[in-house]
Amino acid sequence: MGSSVAEQQSKMNKYSFVCAVVASMISIIFGYDTGVMSGAMIFIKEDLKINDTQVEVLAGILNLCALVGSLTAGRISDYVGRRYTIVLASVIFLVGSVLMGYSPSYAVLMTGRCTAGIGVGYALMIAPVYSAEISSPSYRGFLTSLPELCISLGILLGYISNYFFGKLPLKLGWRMMLGIAAIPSLALSFGVLKMPESPRWLVMQGRVGDAEKVLLKVTNTKEEAELRLLDIKTAAGIDDSSNVTRPNSKRSSGEGVWKELLWKPTPPVRRILIAAIGIHFFEHATGIEAVVLYSPRIFKKAGVMAKDKLLLATIGVGITKTCFILVATFFLDKVGRRKLLLTSLGGMTVALTMLGMALTVVEHSATKLLWALGLSIGSVYVFIAFYSIGLGPITWVYSSEIFP
């Protein structure tokens, strides 16, 4: 009997899986915006007659605006709920996509890119949080890694969009690449409304009865639902033995959280903070944005000159990223976070070293070297593969698990 209950609890709940997938679809739009810009920049530079500095600002401004979005998204999600925050992110993406698709000038294009960047900040924060809060601990690693899988899928779709829309007339092609993201943004904003709210957020609002109803849907047994509800109430400061249904007001509003984290953190909190900031810093500092955004330029530097071949080689980056993220989602809960992370970092180090050596040889060679070209392309693919099996998905899973 006991083993039967345990087996039911470890089995993935289909409803929570669907909810996590729908929430993670916001990450597809983010990934698309990131991937599509890598190829679109080639056509934008030619059409708008902008210089390399303007192209670099256009590519990099997304992360700066994402910082603004992520700093505000947490507080907003605590006020309006995780579900409506995803809707808000979809609307922001919609506005940004329309502006970029219309953009008659560089200024309007930058405005659209900045708007989309704020949406990126929201998406990066809310999708993993919702997935973690809706899922059971036994398969939380898998569901929390779904946003990273969706980002990779979005990047791949962006690369494919580059290839096909690149065949259209210059003035229309890149605008279609950027503007078409408005369609899934609109669809997602309506689809999310059919999803349940996060049970954790409902408890934080004192809606314990509603939270219990959601937990009964996203778990396989009543016992598991009751256990998860008890854990949430304990974290929210609600005494289960009393009739109080409102959480501790300071915990609910987040009051004192920044002070506890930054001003006088306890040794355990300090370790958690250093680990979380460190893993996120190195996720980006290892160069993934440079490879994803500038892969066409890397391949051109290596010796691929035709636009069609450049974009086809870039599609290979997207396929590699998506496939290995998919592999990682199935191994996260079996192999463990630490082993995958160490394997990932080791492979990335070797791949970047080989890429640097190959591009240096190409730069100092008077003739085209096929082996150096092959090594450059192969090193990019290997780098993406190792990033995708470890550092990419684990960063978000790890952060959602170590913080209360």
Image: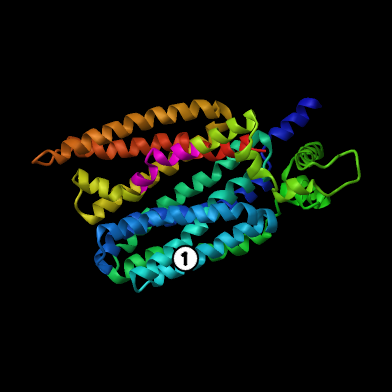
Q: Is residue 22 above or below residue 135?
A: below
Q: Which one is nearer the viewer's eye here, 152 or 83?
A: 83
Above or below: residue 239 compared with residue 91: above
Quarter of the picture containing the C terminus is: top right
Quadrant of the image occupied by residue 84: bottom right
Could you say where residue 253 lies in the image, as x and y percent from the top left? 72, 51
What is the magenta range? 279-292
Q: Which residue is mark 1?
A: 96
**Outermost residue toward the left?**
366
Q: Is residue 25 visible?
A: no
Q: Main secondary structure of the magenta part?
A: helix
The reply, left or right, for residue 215 in relation to residue 51 is: right
Instruction: Name the residue nearer the viewer: 110 or 98.
Output: 110
Q: Is residue 126 visible?
A: yes
| Residue 152 on image: x %, y % | 45, 47
Residue at the (77%, 29%) spot, across then down:
4
Which quadrant of the figure has residue 11?
Answer: top right
Q: Is residue 293 above or below residue 233?
A: below
Q: Position of residue 42 (x, y in %)?
A: 27, 59
Image quarter hosting the N terminus:
top right
